[in-house]
Image (tube, rainbow, N blue to C red):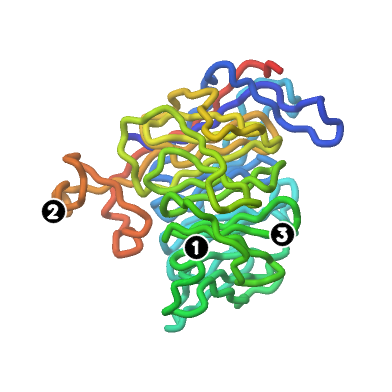
Amino acid sequence: MADSAQTFHAGEHYSNQDATVQYPTYNISRPPSQVLDIELGPCCRSAKWCSDGEAILTGNEDRFLDVYSVDEQSDSPNDNQSPSLSKRSFRQGSPIYETAWYPYATPRNPSTYCFLASLRDTPIRLVDATDGRLRASYKIVDHRERFVAPHSIAFNLTAQKFYCGFLDAIEVFDLSVPGEGTRLHTIPSKKSRDGLRGIISSLVFCPDHSGLFAAGTFSSSIGMLSEDTGGQILMYLDDVKGPVSQLLFHPTNPRLLFARFRHEQSLYVWDVRNTSQCYSSLKGPITSSQPSNQRRYFDIDSSGRWLVDGDQDGNINIYKVDTLQSENKSVLSFRAHEDAISTAVFRPTKAMVLSVSGSRRFDVEKTGNSPEASGDDGGNIIEISDDEEEDGATDSDSIPASIVVHLEQLEHVAK
C-alpha cells in the first residue's frame, strides 16, 4: 500500500480577535479538498515544519534527509493559490532515528536555517538546511566508548540548549559548544527499580518558561523533570497506557500534557497538578486495522483550540481541546490516505495541516519467515517496530512504497 503525506488548508489565515497574537483559524465544518500531490518515494518516518512554516523536513527509510521549501504564489492571507514545493535531499551514512529543527529556523535567515539529526552509531549532526553541510557535531559516548544516537531530541525554550534521550539517560548540550554534553542519569543505578528506566522516547518542554519538561520511555513510564534539578525526577505520571510514542504540552494551558502510546488508538491527557490519574482521553472512530508499534505523531494548533491526529486506517481526526471532558470524540474525521498516518501537524503560520502516511513493510517470502512465526494474524506482510530495526533489520528488508504529499484546502473559516 502506498505511503503518502498530505497538507490541508483550512481557510482564513489569521484571526482578528487578538491584536497582539494572530493565530490561524480553521473551518472544521467539512473535509478539505486536495491542492497539491507530490510523489516522494520510500517510507517516511516523520515530517516537521520549520518555525515560520516555509520549509518541511522529512527523515526517510532510504537514509535521506529531505528539505522541501514551500514557494508561495502570493503572501496575501486571503490568496488561495496552490503553493509549490522544491526539494533538496541530503544522503546520510546511517539510518535516521530523529530530527529537530532549530526553533527559530527560517529560510529567510541563513544563519538560523539548520536542524539536528540523530543517525545510528554516529554523533548528533547540526546540518545546514540550505546545502546539507555539517555545521557542528555533538557526541554521546557509552561505557564501551561507542557513539550513541538518541531516540528523542528537544530544544529548551531559550534554544540555547538541547536535550537528547537514550537508554536510561538524557544528554544536555549547549548548542554553541560542539563536542560532549552533560549526562543526566534517569535511574540511580543499574540495579535500581526507581527512575525512568529504558529508552527515553519522547522529550517536551512546558511552554510556561518554568524549565519543567516531561520525559517518556518505551518502558511505559512518564516523569516530570526540571532544568534546575538535573536528572532528579520531580513526579511520575500514573496510569500510563504503554510505550510512549509522543508527549506534547498544551500551548496555552501548560498544565495539560497529551500523550500517545504504541498499541493505543486513543490519546490521553494528564493534568500535571494531579498525576495520580489520567485527566481525559480523546477517542476517534473505531478503526479496522490492528494497533502496531509504529510511532504516530499528532499536533495542537498554536491557539490551543484544535488537535489533529491520524489513525491506522488513513483517517485524519480533529478534536476540540480548548475545553475537555473526561472522554472526547473527534469533531471532524475524514479519509486522507490508504495507509496508516504517521504524522499530522499544523502549519505554524497558516491554516494548513501536513499529514504523512505509510508504514514500514517486511517481505515475508524474501526472508523465509511465516506470518505465524512473526506474530501476524495471517497477513502476508508484517510491520517492524523501531526497536526491531535496531536489532539488525537493514534497508533491503523493506519493500519500497511510494509516499504522496498533499496540500489540501478548506473554504474560509466559519467563526
Give percent across and percent down for residue 136. 62, 69
3D distance between C-alphas at marks 3 and 1: 20 Å
Q: Is residue 394 left or right of residue 341?
A: left
Which residue in the structure is indicated by mark 2? 368
Q: Amino acid at mark 2?
A: Gly
Residue occupied by mark 1: 200
Q: Secondary structure at mark 3?
A: loop
Front tag of 3 and 1: 1
Amino acid type of the residue tagged 1 in the rendering: Ile
Task: Please tell me which residue is depicted at 63% across the width and 16% down the height of the picture.
Answer: 411
Query: Can residue 131 be spotted in the picture?
Result: no
- In this orientation, which residue lies closer to the viewer: 357 or 296? 296
Please say if 273 is above or below 167: above
Q: CA distance from mark 2 to mark 3?
A: 48 Å
Q: Quadrant of the N terminus?
A: top left
Picture residue at 58% right of the left edge, 32% below the top = 325
2 or 3: tag closer to the N-terminus = 3
Q: Is residue 192 left or right of residue 49?
A: left
Q: How many marks?
A: 3
